[in-house]
Image: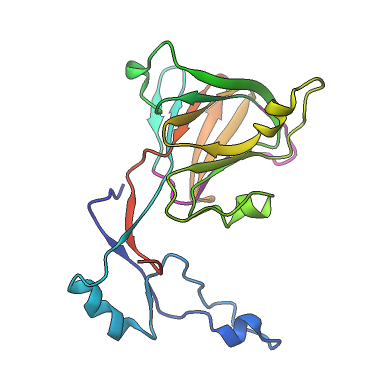
Amino acid sequence: FIDDSIPILGVNSDPSRLEEIFGDEKKDERRSRGALCGITATNVHATLPQILYGDISPGLRSRIQCLVRSTYTETRLPPSLNDLLITQPIPAAVSRFRLALCKGKAKPSFNINDDEDELFSFNVWSSGMWIATPSGSSAAIFNAGGFKMDIRSRNLQYMVREHMIEEGMTHHLKSAGHSIIRPDEMLKLRWNSQNGAVYVDGQHFKHNLELGDEIRVDSHAPYLKIFDQRS
């Protein structure tokens, strides 16, 4: 758990080359795009001294805070820099959950206010859902039909995957399956499938879900302080 007190600098030692990206010739797929790297092997000698002497300041990137409340336990997942995927472990299975957008922050159960201001809620049958930060908005959620966000935004973006719309659902609730979570809001899910999982930034970290688990998500994880290409 790196908080916002530690600045991070990534050096892309083998960056992709423009002539390889846009050329017709076969390219070396082992090269790195380095989206989170502030400098590359070609400019490290010129840029690193500027960083060390304070001429370049780090930027801040939002991360996702996620709390999972089960019958007897409550788990705070690692902050997510890119996205969360909440779904059934079996791709062909239906993910069932109740989705609600509420005012306030994702708090532990001992600190939950009973009169949470719920903006809307509805039942969802789908293939799960994506929740992405601005950093992750150009990746999986974008390819699923989402939109790119300002990299310095504090908002999060969420999207229900392959949403099976109930008959009679209002246009407002239909559109509520893909929207943003503002800093003063949180997304709340009640998991209604027998099994499920929350995947944090890909397959590297997985938290299993059971029927009845409650998932709370907001943008109040510690920022990542990073020297990136926008610093």
Report x, y in % for residue 57: 26, 65
Residue visible at 53% across and 52% down in the picture: 149
Report whether residue 40 is seen: yes
Report x, y in % for residue 103: 45, 24
Residue visible at 46% across and 30% down in the picture: 185
Report x, y in % for residue 27: 63, 84
Answer above or below: position of 120 versus 43: above
- Magenta residue check for 85: yes
The answer to which image quadrant residue 96 occupies is top right
The answer to which image quadrant residue 108 occupies is top left
Considering the whole magenta stretch, tell me its main secondary structure.
loop
Report x, y in % for residue 129: 62, 38
| Residue that extends furthest to the right in the rendered view of this protein | 167
Answer above or below: position of 65 versus 213: below
What residue range appears in magenta?
A: 79-96
Residue visible at 46% across and 70% down in the picture: 34
